[in-house]
Amino acid sequence: MSNSTAPIRIQGLSEIADGYSAVLCDVWGVVHNGVRSFPAGREALARFRDGGGTVVLLTNAPRLSQPIIDQLRSLGVEDTSYDAVVTSGDVTRDLLAKRGKAKALHIGTDNHLPLYAGLDITLTDGLEADVICCTGLRDDEHESPDDYDEELKSYAARGLPMICANPDLVVERGNRFIWCAGSLAERYRSFGGTTLVAGKPHKPIYDAALARAEVLRGMPIDRSRVLAIGDGAPTDLTGACGQGLDVLFVTGGIHAANFGPTESPEAGAVGRFLEMEQIGARAFLPHLQW
């Protein structure tokens, strides 16, 4: 594996693309920011596919794949930029299905309720629930994790397990940072609660993405031929390194303030950051481009 705490600075994906058969690419922060998509990133993925590569978009979104595909289209991301989408919501649904019949407390917005469709799950309040499924804050425009402390402490005291459908702590929405389900899961653990986390950096979502890539290519893929692209250290980079995958670090995302000018990240600062986080990358660039 070629990841290190002294990754090379590249100008574009084309400099290293020949070494890979498949890309597992983060979505939010690399392909779009929730408000607009990034043309250079879209083009880079499309050109990788034009060269015979397979692109699986890998996202911690707490929804099933089809709504994410619809969102990508609404933001101008062409279908030609990727082959498949695998979401944290897909993995969460699998975890819920394995529980069989259950009473669940849903913490999140009503937009995520389709996650439970067709499952033997009854949605109820915290008094009757035997499991919590957290997809996010109920009002992520105005709330913070602090607003949930007393509620979470009471559930932790009862020993309710929490399935976290989005391990991200925060995400960019336009030029703002929005709290995600991972922030509540982290708070829940601090109160002694048990959490099951569905998405990156955990193994199940990578297994699902790699399996999908192999089906698309019609053959097994050696992990040395898979490149993970992402901007988040706790999720994208940690997860990929843990799975033995090479990493292309997009420094202009959620950690941009650590590296000096966004368009000219300082190699020394990138290296110090990776060393502090105890992870590595093969290469870095400020924004995904070809």
Image (tube, rainbow, N blue to C red):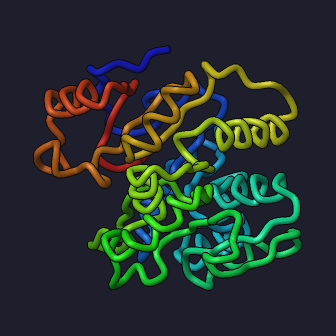
Q: In this view, does 284 lie to the left or right of 122?
A: left
Compared with 8, 287 (above or below) is below
Query: Residue sitting at 48 percent across and 63 percent down?
Result: 181
Q: Can residue 250 be seen in this view?
A: yes
The answer to whether residue 162 is visible is no
Residue 214, position as x, y percentages in the image: 80, 34
Q: Quadrant of residue 130?
A: bottom right
Query: Residue at left 39%, top 57%?
Result: 187
Q: Which residue ends up furthest to the top in the rendered image? A: 1
**Residue 96 or residue 38, whichever sits in front:** 96
Q: Camera-side residue: 52 or 98?
A: 98
Left or right, residue 136 beside residue 284: right
**Residue 204: horizontal and vertical position, in percent?**
68, 40
Judged left or right of residue 124, residue 257 is left
Above or below 269: residue 158: below
Q: Which of 129 and 244 is in front in this view?
A: 129
Report the number of numbered marks: 0
> Quadrant of residue 147 in the image?
bottom left
Q: Give the residue at the far left of this rendering.
A: 260
Front-most of residues 264 and 268: 268
Instruction: Locate residue 247: give its quadrant.
Output: top left
Q: Where is residue 45 in the image (x, y as percent from the top left)?
A: 55, 49
**Which part of the image, by quadrant, shows the C terminus?**
top left
Residue at point 18% right, 41% down? 265
Taking the image as shown, residue 208 lies to the left or right of residue 235, namely: right
Who's the residue at 48% across and 68% down the image?
A: 154
Place of residue 23 in the rendered image (x, y in percent of width and height, measured from the top left): 60, 38
